[in-house]
Image: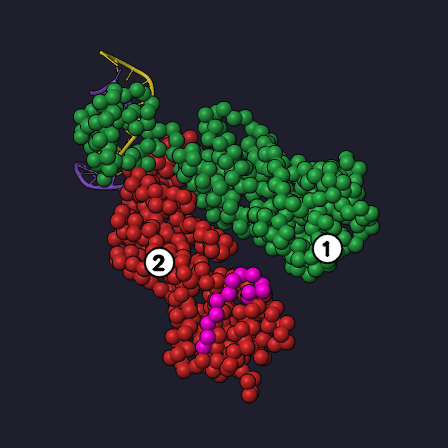
Chain colours: A red, B green, C purple, D yellow
DNA sequence: CTGAAAGCGCTTACAG
DNA sequence: CTGAAAGCGCTTACAG
């Protein structure tokens, strides 16, 4: 395999000129550049990664730690992993995947050996040891999610409270005065990530601010429990006319089937909004309005902040990405007299 | 951050002695070793990855290409990705995750720049351009799955034909003379990986060899279609008494519910085996016998073969991993007179 | 059992 | 606009 000396020889220049020509870090004469380009093509030259890492100040690799918890929804998890990898490539970075059983040891290893320039931390939980470790190591990092103690850390996440508030506002603005939120299984609120809690709190707070009635109910993932949670909520007094669902894809379908099975029509009898789905709700029956959680949004921003930490142009911060609303026709004014 | 010179100075030895002490590539005197260990601990020394890569012959990184197709079942996909990463760590290798939109360019890039020592190719399809590229680049690689043209390549996969044959044998040995296989959606057989086809062919061939009646039916993933495929098969003449299901987790559940809904009991009225599931079937109602597809098995072997290619001790081959049978009580003798 | 030194393939001041 | 050279942090023959 050709190296930089080969290219220099063939092009009749010094290796430093080749290096500068390829990096663009200093101006190169027209003809010189052409000869170098020609030599590079002729030799099918590609700079050696190790040589580059050692001589330069960057490895152009980020580590990605993405633990798969028992309550993790795999498709969403995968979407985030891929979004990080894709975003990294846009900054000419590669992604090294750390395994779960090596969560903290792996972080230590790749940062101490300088294998990576920084770390992207996915699915951050409230008491996340990775957050403390990253802080202790002083390694450039961007967390996706917000740990309990975010001091000194760079975090990016969807603004889940604003997302929930947005759902409430839409429903209240449409005329609804009694709302309900169907959420994740109880275990999800007790451990793991804190976003379900933030979504729930945002929902209840905004409902209170808007002076409307609001209730919240958790559901397990199995169809019977989903139905009983749904019916429990629908049978309340006053009966909610606006429903927000924060759950996995399959659970949404069960909810919609159960609503239809009850003879209720969306949005005529009930307005429904999908909480912060990572999946597409436009193909549901009926299509659901949603406030989507878009992996690319937070991941791209996280990678960007990680890259900028390397120039020292980023201070610790918690950055919340503003939610957006997608209309698919599942929200309307409540029926008269309901 | 301390480097090897610091360690050598503190320990009062040369850097080569430090290097050899850490790699274990030559014998080190008792006291010398202790002094070096002490210095390493004192300085919290960890060898620089780039220096190691450049001086050594290995980067200790494998690239992993794992495209997410539209018909990919995400949890299985993720399980394979993690299994590769975990297996790689056992050989002191890290895994670099290639993105889909960079499938071939990424392979080219990381192998030409010598960023990686080899490539693990996941979810290989029949006409997989990655297989051809790997062959053309001559880069050490292990494919998980078997491409149409496996010449010159190292491939590892479950022996799907043997797995299907094993299912047939179990049922026939239990006394069943009429079998059915419920398979994936039609699209899966037409493109993508070839393992569904291999499983189907293995099923039909062995049934023929054993001289029993066998039919095969594909199903889409939605519950209505699953039920109609199931009923279509059960209503055939002669009615199958042994059923093999090769599908996603959710589809299995729909099948089992539909069987129960028909008033049939497993295994009394119908013996059922889960094809090559990547999920646990022991928690199903009822628990299902299975011939599991265990990501760790094939991935560990693939990583091992990739590592051994680097010593040149592996010739191109297609290695099929033998299937195993897991009993959970869903197979019994057919009812008399049925 | 140990050391001095070459060399891996780059980048980047330094010099012109 | 270009070049000669130092140096990044290791590994590994070579020598004793």
Chain letter of disc 2 in the image: A
Find out whether the residues at labels 2 and 1 contact each other: C-beta distance under 8 Å: no
Q: Residue at image x 54%, y 71%? A: A230
SS category of the residue bearing label 1? loop
Q: Which residues are magenta?
A: A214-226
Are the residues flagged by discs 2 and 1 from a single subunit? no
Q: Which residue corresponds to mark 2? A: A126
Lateral position of residue B5 relative to residue A282, left or right = left
Closer to the observer: label 2 or label 1?
A: 1
Q: Relative to B315, does residue A229 appear above or below in the rendering?
A: below
Position of residue D6 relative to residue B76, above or below, is above
Instruction: Identify which residue, B240 or A140, lies in the foreground.
Output: B240
Instruction: Give the side of residue B124 with respect to residue B98, left or right.
Output: right
Q: Callout 1: 10 Å neighbours few (<14), some, many (20+)?
A: some
Quadrant, the N terminus of chain B: top left
Q: Residue D5 appears in which quarter of the rendering? A: top left
Residue B336 in magenta stretch = no
In the foreground, A168 or B270: B270
Work out whether B298 lies above or below A311: above
Q: Which residue is mark 1?
A: B264
- Say if residue A328 shows up in the picture: no
Q: Residues within 10 Å of mark 2 (few under 14, many from 20)?
A: some
Q: Residue B120, position in %: x, y?
A: 50, 38
Q: Residue at x 52, y 78 (%)?
A: A236
Residue A56's spot in the image, x, y percent? 29, 40
Q: Regarding mark 2 in the picture, which secondary structure is present there? A: loop
Expressed as whole percent of the image width and height from the top left, the position of residue A185 reads 48, 62
Measuring 79% from the left and 40% from the top, which residue is drawn there? B212
Quarter-wise, where is residue A47 in the image? Answer: top left
Say whether residue A216 is magenta: yes
């Amino acid at each position: 395999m050709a190296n930089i000396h080969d290219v220099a020889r063939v092009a009749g220049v010094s290796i430093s000129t080749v290096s500068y020509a390829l990096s663009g870090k200093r101006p190169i004469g027209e003809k010189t550049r052409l000869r170098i380009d020609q030599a590079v093509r002729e030799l099918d030259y590609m700079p050696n990664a190790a040589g580059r890492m050692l001589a330069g100040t960057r490895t152009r690799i980020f580590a990605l730690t993405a633990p798969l918890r028992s309550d993790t929804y795999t498709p969403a998890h995968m979407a985030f992993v891929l979004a990080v990898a894709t975003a990294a490539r846009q900054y000419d970075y590669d992604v090294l995947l750390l395994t779960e059983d090596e969560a903290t040891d792996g972080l230590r290893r790749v940062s101490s050996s300088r294998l990576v320039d920084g770390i992207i931390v996915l699915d951050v939980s409230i008491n996340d040891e990775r957050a403390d470790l990253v802080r202790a190591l002083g390694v450039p990092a961007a967390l996706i999610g917000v740990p309990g103690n975010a001091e000194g850390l760079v975090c990016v996440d969807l603004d889940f409270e604003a997302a929930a508030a947005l759902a409430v506002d839409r429903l209240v603005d449409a005329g609804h005065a009694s709302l309900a939120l169907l959420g994740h299984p109880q275990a999800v609120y007790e451990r793991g990530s804190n976003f379900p809690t933030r979504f729930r709190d945002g929902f209840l707070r905004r409902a209170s601010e808007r002076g409307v009635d609001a209730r919240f109910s958790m559901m397990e993932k199995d169809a019977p429990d989903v139905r009983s949670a749904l019916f429990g909520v629908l049978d309340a007094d006053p009966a909610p006319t606006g429903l927000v669902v924060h759950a996995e894809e399959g659970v949404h379908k069960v909810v919609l089937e159960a609503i239809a099975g009850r003879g209720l029509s969306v949005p005529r009898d009930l307005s429904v909004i999908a909480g912060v789905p990572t999946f597409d709700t436009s193909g549901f029956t009926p299509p659901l309005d949603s406030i989507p959680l878009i992996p690319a949004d937070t991941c791209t921003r996280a990678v960007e902040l990680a890259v900028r930490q390397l120039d020292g142009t980023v201070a610790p911060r918690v950055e919340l990405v503003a939610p957006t609303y997608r209309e698919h026709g599942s929200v309307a004014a409540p029926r008269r007299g309901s």
